[in-house]
């Protein structure tokens, strides 16, 4: 059953972590009637095939530390197409409201008198399960701390110092150029042996990952040939399966 999501306007849609089957039914229904799709670098192009043949698809991606479409240009395109077409989809990798600037675009559109709606997507951090890493697990981690490694000024977020001293699972986005800095911070605080994982191309057939101690993040990335796009997961959940079986074995022995 297709829910009422409005007849027209700008739809800021989460494309999920990569696997095209991981979008929501609501997102699928909007894509089916899209007139224009402005899509990001991390969106699986298979999603564009859901749209009608008459749909215009326009790439507005940003590649880390490489070529990118300026946000001002994206804003101009939103105004141009939303003023002319009935259903304009802004398709963004993962979830648009998790380090995706989706809410900025929604506010911009509303300020221009454009009706805008948000449709969530599965974030890449939720894809950690494809690497057998739960974000929480009873007795191991009761919370999750999500951090961007690179702030607007290019510096590592100071929140990492707070997060690493909590019992939370730490998930770091956009951190592949900060691996040495992240490792050093943990080492300086006597926490270099905390389990960590890097997962690249989450949920896709060519997904790659490395599990190591946080002090060896950079070494592990080089060994496995890992780069962007990737997430970093730090905490005992990385070894949750191992901890679970060790606990059960101890009970049997006892």
Image (tube, helix red, strand yellow):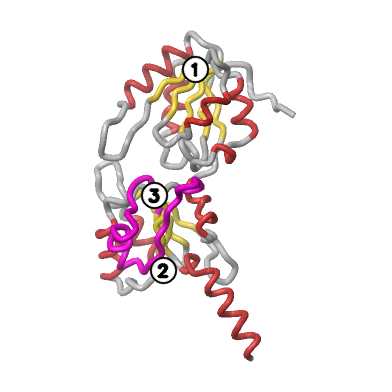
**Secondary structure under the numbered disc 1 in the rendered image:** strand
Foreground: 94 or 42? 42
**For the residues bearing labels 3 and 2, Cβ distance under 8 angstroms:** no
**Residue underneath mark 2:** 195
Q: What stretch is highlighted in magenta?
A: 202-231
**Residue underneath mark 1:** 36
- Image quadrant in which you'd find residue 154: top left
- Residue 75, horizontal then vertical, whole percent: 38, 21
Foreground: 163 or 252? 252
- Residue 28, horizontal then vertical, whole percent: 61, 29
Along the horizontal axis of the image, is 152 left or right of 41? left
**Residue underneath mark 3:** 230
Q: Residues within 10 Å of mark 2 (few under 14, many from 20)?
A: many
**Secondary structure under the numbered disc 2 in the rendered image:** strand
Foreground: 34 or 210? 210
Disc on the earlier residue, 3 or 2: 2
- Residue 170, horizontal then vertical, whole percent: 43, 59
- Work out which quarter of the rendered image holds the C terminus and state it: bottom right
Q: Which residue is drawn at 58% across and 41% down?
A: 22
- Work out which quarter of the rendered image holds the N terminus and state it: top right
Q: Which residue is drawn at 33% across and 49% down?
A: 227
Q: Residue furthest front?
A: 206
Along the horizontal axis of the image, is 198 left or right of 82? left
Q: Distance between the residues labelled 1 and 2?
A: 44 Å
Q: Which residue lies furthest to the top in this view?
A: 84
């Amino acid at each position: 059953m297709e829910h009422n999501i409005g007849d027209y306007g700008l739809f800021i849609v989460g494309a999920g972590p990569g696997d095209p089957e991981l979008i929501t039914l609501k997102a699928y229904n909007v894509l089916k009637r899209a007139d224009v799709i402005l899509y990001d670098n991390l969106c699986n192009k298979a999603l564009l095939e859901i749209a009608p043949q008459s749909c215009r698809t326009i790439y507005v991606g940003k590649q880390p530390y490489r070529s990118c479409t300026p946000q001002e240009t994206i804003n101009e395109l939103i105004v141009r197409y939303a003023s002319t077409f009935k259903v304009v989809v802004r398709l963004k990798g993962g979830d648009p409201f998790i380090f995706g600037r989706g809410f900025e675009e929604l506010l911009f559109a509303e300020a221009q008198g454009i009706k805008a709606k948000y449709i969530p997507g599965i974030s890449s951090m939720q894809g950690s399960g494809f690497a057998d890493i739960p974000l929480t697990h009873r007795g191991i981690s009761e919370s999750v701390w999500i951090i961007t490694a690179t702030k607007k000024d290019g510096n590592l977020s100071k929140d990492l110092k707070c997060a690493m001293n909590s019992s939370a699972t730490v998930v770091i986005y956009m951190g592949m150029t900060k691996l040495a800095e992240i490792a050093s911070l943990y080492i300086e605080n006597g926490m270099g042996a905390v389990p960590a994982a890097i997962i690249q191309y989450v949920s896709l057939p060519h997904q790659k990952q490395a599990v190591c101690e946080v002090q060896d993040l950079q070494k592990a990335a080089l060994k496995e040939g890992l780069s962007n796009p990737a997430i970093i997961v730090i905490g005992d959940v990385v070894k949750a399966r191992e901890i679970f079986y060790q606990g059960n074995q101890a009970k049997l022995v006892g």
